[in-house]
Image (cartoon, coloured by chain):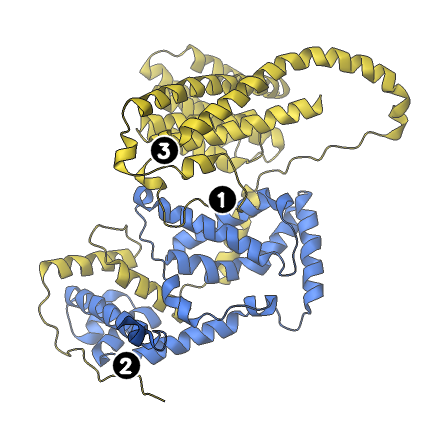
Amino acid sequence: MEAHIDEPTVRSWEHECVARAVQGDRDAFGELYDAHAEPIFRRVLYPVLGNTSAAEDALAETFRAAFQRLDRYQPGAAGIYPWLATIARNKAMDMHRARKVTGRALANFEALLAPLHVTPGSPEQLLDEASSQRQLVHAVHETLEQINARYREAIALRFLEDQPREACAERLGVKVGTFDVLLLRALRAFRKRWEELRAPAGADLEAR
Amino acid sequence: MTDRRTPLDEPDELPPPDAEELASAAALARALEGGRAEPELPQDALETAALLRASAGTAQLGERRRRELREELLASLPARARRRTRWPSWLLPLLPVAGVAAAYLLLLRDDRSESAALSKATQERAEAVAPVVAASPASSTPSGSTHDDGQPRLAAAARSAPTSEGERSAGPLANEARSLADDDRRALTRDIARGASELRRELLARADDGAVARAYAELDAARSTPALQQSRRVLIELSNALDERTDDDGRLIRQDLYCRLAETALRLGEPQTALEWTRRGLALDGQPTPLLAQLEALEGDAWVALGDDNRAARGYMRALEVHEKLLDEDLDGQ
């Protein structure tokens, strides 16, 4: 959503879309989807599920459920995003519960993100995608700088450059099986450093 | 200010991995490429990988994908219930006539009220037994029960059920509760099946094509496995042929076909297949209709056949909710 559009205009547009969608207007609901699908996917579903295809499924389920319950939605100052985010979170938790049945590899990394989050004080902050993404990228690079160079390269190739594991193994001059082990160790080293860097100040003192 | 950096302490050489680490690394590699969650999958590493993907932007919902999902979503949205129109003011002088009509309708209502009372009793008893019937480790989550929008609902009873193995095998009390639940289930499913059957008759009467009616007649007459399988093939063809229809009746007939396909799968002893059909039917239209209640109840039946009491109880609870809603609407309408 563009930052220059003032809040009352956005809310009034949202209310109008909701009212039309409640009457069965699918295009109006499509407009709400256009405005909120991406942030719901990136800020709520992917961090809870850690799996693109599961997050896409949950996104569709979220909006389907929202459409059916739209007449129960009570417009508030923050707009419809928090309401949609609540539905999305519940859908994602349902998928975690169903993990044993579906066999999906899901990874909730909200706990890792938690130290980066600034409690949103306004709808603008809540929707400020760019700043939270910048914060995340900065924190990741800061952590990468502080782990072993070989581990850093393995992570960069596999996740930041999105290379297939065979190509990563070739670049690092190891067999694919060895690269898998290297990557596992790299991820564990990264996580350890991430948690150390983001441990609340004085936590170690309190623990004593 | 303290420098929180520490010297690099990870070895540059890769010490030989043990069997456990090798298995974890292989499971992680497969999971990262979309594989299933295997027992050896290291959850900590998978979470870290997902965090890194999120930071790289590879986990974003691309514009093209967003549009594809939008199209799929809008095409699959159920029709919203039509709002009741207000009575025009010129009908006011006709109130005395309406009074006579109301007296007549009250006679009809008696029949409905019996059904409503039965259903109310079913609900109360189902709520009472749900904690026992629904008890299973799957319902135990740190966050407890959640609903799509935080609204309370009947299934909350099932979801907040005790979960330990000890409580699951609670002995005679649990058995008694299960038997009560079975009685309720039979009463409920009978009631729901009657409603679905009435709607089916209306739909078939409105439809110009007799093919569905013929297929249903054949299915009802089928007794042997080959006959059931043959009927199933016909129903699948009919449901495929209706894919293009987006009107309300077309969607309802498809939903009904999925109901019948789920029933057939259960008769053939294929509960997993039955679940697939109920899921398709439920995804088609979420408005409360007798068919929706029937699909939820069939889902309950399929879970019973699969031995999962917890999911079965939830299916029946949802069926009960839809059923109650329909009865309320009927009573309001009269």
Counting residues from the N terminus, which is met first, the one under dot 3 or under dot 1?
Answer: 1
The residue type indicated by label 3 comes to Asn
Foreground residue among B2 and A64: B2
Query: Which residue is label 2 attached to?
Result: A146
In the structure shown, which secondary structural element does the residue marked by tag 1 occupy?
A: loop
In the structure shown, which secondary structural element does the residue marked by tag 3 occupy?
A: helix
* Residue B200 spot, x, y in % from top left: 56, 20
Disc 3 packing (10 Å; few <14; some 14–19; many ≥20): many
* Residue B329 spot, x, y in % from top left: 65, 27
- The quadrant in which the N terminus of chain A is found is bottom right
The residue type indicated by label 1 comes to His
Chain hosting mark 1: B
According to the rendering, which colour does chain B have? yellow
Query: Which residue is label 3 attached to?
Result: B310
Q: Which chain is blue?
A: A
Chain hosting mark 3: B
